[in-house]
Image (cartoon, rainbow, N blue to C red):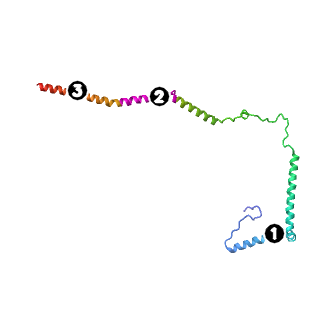
């Protein structure tokens, strides 16, 4: 069982395959357009042929008169309505509450904005204390720096000590050799 489609059945598309089909379709459309014009405008065609441009002038005057009439009616309606809201002393009416923030001259910052400003202030205060040497981090950094300096000094002094030790050892060996040579000469 097929379902019945609503409307007059003119909604489907017409496809053409050849030039002949196209010409036939165009002829059908023209014929239906002529018939429609004939049904709608038999009286209009007679009036147009007789009066012509005189009717156009009358029509424009009618439009102007209608616009003027509409404007006057709209103005009368506006005047007749009067004030749009009448205030009454209704004890059950919801009262408009004025919040403290609405009364303040400067608008308050949102929570996120306040937190951001507080973060910036705290960071600036920490940088300032760090530069003055009052933070624990600064003290630990200074201790590490002093230890590193001591290690560097020790490493720099170590080669000098080694050279001095080597010189002492060489001198001792030389003295022993001199003593050994003297003993050998005496013998």
- Classify mark 3: helix, strand or loop: helix
Q: Position of residue 73 (x, y in %)?
A: 87, 52
**According to the image, label 3 marks what residue?**
172
Residue at 86%, 66% in the rendered image: 55
Q: Which residues are magenta?
A: 131-155
- Classify mark 2: helix, strand or loop: helix
**According to the image, label 2 marks what residue?**
140
Q: Is residue 148 left or right of residue 170?
A: right
Earlier residue among tags 1 and 2: 1
Q: Is residue 151 shown above or below 47? A: above
What is the total number of numbered labels drawn onto the structure image? 3
- Classify mark 1: helix, strand or loop: helix
Measured Cα–Cα span from mark 1 to mark 3: 138 Å
Q: Quadrant of residue 122?
A: top right
Q: Is residue 109 left or right of residue 163?
A: right
The quadrant of the picture occupied by the N terminus is bottom right
- Residue 37 has which mark? 1
Residue 149 belongs to magenta span: yes
Earlier residue among tags 2 and 3: 2
Most prominent secondary structure in the magenta stretch?
helix
């Amino acid at each position: 069982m097929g379902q019945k489609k609503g409307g007059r059945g003119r909604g489907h598309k017409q496809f053409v395959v050849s030039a002949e089909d196209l010409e036939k379709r165009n002829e059908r459309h023209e014929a239906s357009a002529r018939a429609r014009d004939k049904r709608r405008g038999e009286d209009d065609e007679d009036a147009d042929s007789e009066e012509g441009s005189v009717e156009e002038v009358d029509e424009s005057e009618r439009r102007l008169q209608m616009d003027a009439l509409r404007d006057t009616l709209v103005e009368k309606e506006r005047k007749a309505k009067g004030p749009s809201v009448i205030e009454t002393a209704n004890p059950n009416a919801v009262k408009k509450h004025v919040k403290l923030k609405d009364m303040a001259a400067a608008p308050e910052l949102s929570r996120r904005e306040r937190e951001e400003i507080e973060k910036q202030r705290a960071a600036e205060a920490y940088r300032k204390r760090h530069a003055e040497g009052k933070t624990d981090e600064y003290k630990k950094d200074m201790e590490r720096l002093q230890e590193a300096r001591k290690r560097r000094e020790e490493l720099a002094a170590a080669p000098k000590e080694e050279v001095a030790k080597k010189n002492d050892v060489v001198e001792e060996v030389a003295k022993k050799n001199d003593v050994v040579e003297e003993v050998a000469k005496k013998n």
